[in-house]
Amino acid sequence: MINLYSDTQTRPSDAMRVAMAAAEVGDEQRREDPTVVALEERVAELLGQEAAVFLPSGTMCNAIAVRLYIRPGGDQMFLGENAHPLRFEAGGPAAISGAVLTVVPGAAGIFTADALRGALGAVSPGDRYAPRPRLVSVEQPTNVGGGRVWPVQQIVDVLDVAAEHGMHSHLDGARLMNAVVASGLSASAYAEPFDTAWIDFTKGLGAPVGACLAGSGDLIAEAWRYKQMWGGAMRQAGVIAAAGLYALDHHVDRLADDHANARRLADGLAAIDGIAIDPDSVETNIVVFDVADAPAFCAALEAEGVLMGPLGADRVRAVTHLDVDADGIERALAAAACAV
């Protein structure tokens, strides 16, 4: 099976499993697991933040970050179209934190400072009729938007508007290292300006579980409280933290291979009648394209041993990763030509 459904489908390599088995461990709740502590310190430095906390999932990173800034009672969060908290977190920001979610329009999930101003409207401080603007979230790179990379200056401009309105800022960096490899910029260049930021180890980095949320020492201390409250605290978690450390050491530079495979996939799809895609829009490892009937197309692909995911009636997402090589891309293209 050529599994392009998501880069979450990666399996730990043999070498990663060896690193996991050899990990030194302890009680992470008591700060006695040296492998977890090493990963948290590594991520904090990587993202240009003071501290970090190891969590079971990226969704928990987002959930805790929202809760740090949002309280029930009309607090408002601004985010791009089809961002992960909107599409894939079961309404968590609203259910857990009472957040009013406001979508800021923008191409491929990337919005401008002016678009954020427009979404904020004419709300004035102390306006009892409107939700209180508290948080802006940026997804870097975008997911459903097709793995597009936010330009640094555009992020800075958006955060300037957020600061003008007294809002906090959060970076959803699930695939941040893909943006780093695609742009040649450091992770801290993207993450340091935000109040909180996180990276996931279970996507292109190939670990089986885990993510790290980073921010100031005070924010991460508060994040630990929610980690405990929501059942995210663990014990001898070094066996999974070791996978994150291994991924950072060995699986970052190779993301360029995934990007090359994604571009090859996009170029091949563009040559197939009945498929609409601009290959130049593919910047990282996510390929989004249009077909007449996405569910039927994906079902036909699966019958040929290829998995992709429908995003709706006529859109499909394919995501490259370390478990799919160049030969797998060629097989996927052959199947796509038959499935249209």
Image (tube, rainbow, N blue to C red):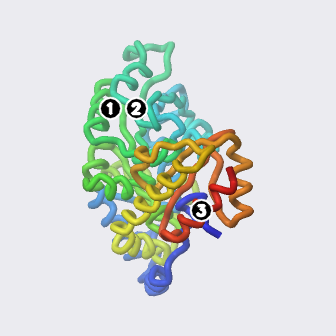
Q: Amino acid at mark 3?
A: Ala
Q: Quadrant of the N terminus?
A: bottom right
- Which residue lies at the image location 46% right of the left edge and 31% below the top edge? 78
Image quadrant where residue 8 sits:
bottom right
Image quadrant where residue 238 sits:
bottom left
Q: Which residue is mark 1?
A: 158
Element assignment for label 2: loop
Question: Which of the pair 273/265 is nearer the observer?
Answer: 273
Q: Is residue 227 visible?
A: no
Q: Residues within 10 Å of mark 1 (few under 14, many from 20)?
A: many
Question: Which of the pair 184/118 is nearer the observer?
Answer: 184
Q: Which mark is residue 111?
A: 2
Q: Nearer the observer, disc 1 or disc 2?
A: 2
Q: Amino acid at mark 1?
A: Val
Q: Which residue is mark 3?
A: 332
- Residue 300: x and y in percent read 73, 56
- Which residue lies at the image location 59% right of the left edge and 62% below the top edge? 332
Question: Which of the pair 28/103 is nearer the observer?
Answer: 103
- Which residue lies at the image location 61% right of the left edge and 67% below the top edge? 2
Q: Amino acid at mark 2?
A: Phe
